[in-house]
Image (spheres, rainbow, N blue to C red):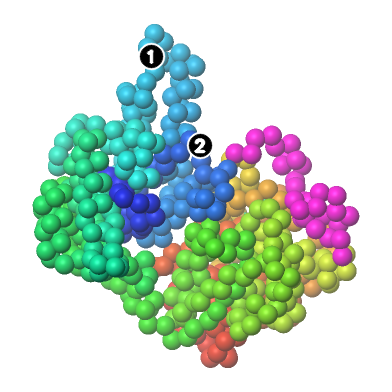
């Protein structure tokens, strides 16, 4: 029988519920259990694809092309396992499905209501990922007490009733704030938030406490008493240097032991060796490098979550500590911001803010032979820069930013020109890319073809391809069925590589993405000379 664990959040948002859920998943996986992950988002958007990353963080794309919540990125990275469209759903998706059935006449004669129709739909989605899973871990977005998350919590309560005590577990992630003036940690907000959960009919079994100071034994006893959970089920989640330490911190406090006991699970396996090795490498770097990230959202790091993590993974592969410097691409002065930078990365993006600054960054990388890594928009930027400054087509642009440009080096394919609905209509998910023998990409991957994830509308315009190639820009990866440019590189440059896809969605700490590992190797070389860095194996 599949067991269900619900992870809820209390007091405030951004507590790292996703990291907690991923860490629990990792611990259970290390015990030899098959774990399925599910994220529910209580907003009305059908998926986060149409949302601004500034509000909700990056949109994470799965192999099957679903645009999902960024927590799925944590699930993939921690569990080293692919997620799919079924692993994330929103209130919008639930309502869309129920309303479509109502229109079809499936509920003829009935009043369609939140309980039971919406909650039944939610429960069926909770169960939909259970095939082959010993444990399904369900993270409910939002904070307990929000109006939006109520149907999700009500459905979770019903699951508890239907499946029975030994089969459903409730874990509440909460904040224990530290009051600086009185130098005290406070349990009251957590008591209130647990009270809110109880009003809904859910008694948490385990409390995970985020706190910036260590929680004393007396405080744990107090939390245990007021929240009505055993003392061993009060788990501390301190601030950490790296999120990848969290599973080990939970394990040391016996969290997995507690879960196994409460769910009456028994296994022999216990293997966190590979994970511990990753954390050890991460905490004992031999080199340090600075990478400039030329994006748009300089103040909101979650917008580039997977890119940040992938750079860290590249660092793990090369035993290098990575400092990320967010460039202000709207500033006219890019050059001074690049002082002591060992690599430049231009990530994906939409909209024209900071475009000229990104083009300048690509130009400086090309001319000063600084390692350059372009991701999606970062490839389009590299092409525009090359067309303007090497081919001397000074008006070259993407039609996304200048629809009337004389030299549309980046353009829409005919099928994208007729798109009417913006939701889920980009080139999404995996496409095969054939690699050119002897190229940087081919050497890094060690394969002739790879599958990588996409999320974009615009493509390199093949009309300009010959011109670009004749002047030293090499196309080293193509999607052959449609003859689309997937990877470009520069001749006579130590490391200049740009991809039309998003390799950052496939990198994991235990399996750093080869292109990120290679890019970081090039930055280490720039920073520390040519001693060859020791790498760990990578593959996609
Ligand atoms: N805006 C560009 C496009 O739609 C790039 C998208 C991206 O970087 N993900 O093609």
Q: Residue at x 51, y 41 (%)?
A: 47
Disc 2: CA contacts within 10 A as few (<14), some (14-19) or many (>=20): many
Q: Position of residue 118 (x, y in %)?
A: 37, 27
Residue 415 lies within the magenta run: yes
Viewer-closest of 389 and 270: 389
The answer to whether residue 34 is visible is: no
- Relative to residue 137, is residue 41 drawn left or right? right
Q: Which image quadrant for residue 251?
A: bottom left
Q: Magenta stretch: give its range.
A: 394-423
The secondary element bearing badge 1 is classed as loop
Up-down relation of residue 531 to residue 282 (above or below): below
Q: Residue at x 81, y 49 (%)?
A: 403
Label annotation for residue 111: 1
Q: Main secondary structure of the magenta part?
A: loop
Query: Which residue appears at 49% of the width and 59% of the height?
Result: 302
Q: Secondary structure at mark 2?
A: loop
């Amino acid at each position: 029988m599949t067991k269900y664990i619900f992870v809820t959040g209390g007091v405030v948002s951004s507590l790292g519920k996703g990291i907690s859920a991923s860490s629990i998943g990792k611990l259970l996986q290390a015990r030899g259990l098959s774990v399925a992950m599910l994220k529910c988002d209580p907003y009305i958007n059908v998926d986060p694809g149409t949302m601004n990353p500034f509000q909700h963080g990056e949109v994470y794309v799965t192999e099957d092309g679903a645009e999902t919540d960024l927590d799925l990125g944590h699930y993939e990275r921690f569990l080293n396992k692919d997620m799919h469209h079924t692993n994330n759903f929103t209130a919008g998706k639930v309502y869309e499905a129920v309303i479509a059935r109502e229109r079809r006449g499936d509920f003829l004669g009935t009043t369609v209501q939140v309980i039971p129709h919406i909650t039944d739909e939610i429960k069926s989605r909770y169960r939909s990922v259970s095939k082959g899973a010993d444990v399904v871990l369900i993270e409910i977005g939002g904070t307990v007490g929000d109006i939006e998350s109520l149907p999700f919590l009500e459905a979770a309560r019903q699951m508890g009733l239907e499946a029975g005590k030994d089969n459903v577990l409730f874990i509440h992630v909460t904040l224990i704030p530290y009051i600086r003036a009185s130098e005290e940690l406070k349990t009251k907000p957590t008591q209130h938030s647990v009270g809110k959960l109880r009003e809904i009919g859910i008694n948490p079994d385990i409390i995970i406490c985020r706190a910036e100071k260590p929680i004393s034994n007396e405080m744990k006893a107090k939390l245990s008493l007021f929240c009505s959970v055993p003392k061993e089920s009060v788990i501390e989640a301190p601030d950490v240097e790296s999120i990848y330490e969290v599973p080990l911190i939970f394990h040391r406090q016996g969290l997995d032991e507690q879960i196994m006991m409460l769910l009456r699970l028994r296994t022999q396996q216990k293997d966190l060796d590979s994970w511990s090795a990753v954390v050890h490498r991460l905490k004992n770097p031999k080199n340090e490098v600075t990478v400039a990230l030329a994006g748009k959202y300089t103040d909101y790091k979650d917008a580039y979550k997977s890119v940040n993590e992938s750079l860290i993974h590249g660092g793990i592969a090369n035993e290098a500590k990575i400092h990320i410097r967010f460039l202000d691409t709207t500033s006219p002065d890019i050059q001074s911001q690049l002082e002591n930078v060992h690599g430049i990365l231009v990530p994906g993006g939409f909209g024209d803010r900071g475009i000229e600054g990104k083009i300048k960054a690509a130009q400086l990388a090309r001319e000063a032979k600084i390692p350059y890594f372009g991701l999606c928009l970062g490839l389009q930027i590299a092409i525009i820069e090359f067309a303007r400054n090497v081919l001397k087509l000074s008006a070259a642009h993407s039609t996304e930013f200048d629809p009337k440009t004389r030299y549309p080096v980046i353009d829409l394919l005919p099928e994208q020109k007729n798109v009417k609905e913006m939701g889920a209509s980009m080139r999404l998910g995996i496409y095969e890319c054939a690699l050119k023998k002897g190229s940087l990409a081919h050497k890094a991957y060690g394969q002739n073809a790879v599958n990588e994830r996409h999320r974009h509308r615009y493509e390199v315009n093949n009309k300009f391809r010959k011109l670009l190639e004749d002047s030293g820009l090499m196309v080293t990866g193509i999607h052959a069925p449609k003859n689309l440019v997937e990877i470009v590189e520069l001749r006579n440059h130590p490391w200049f590589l740009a991809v039309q896809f998003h390799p950052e969605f496939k990198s994991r700490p235990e399996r750093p993405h080869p292109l990120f590992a290679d890019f970081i190797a090039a930055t280490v070389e720039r920073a520390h000379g040519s001693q060859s860095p020791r790498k760990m194996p990578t593959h996609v």
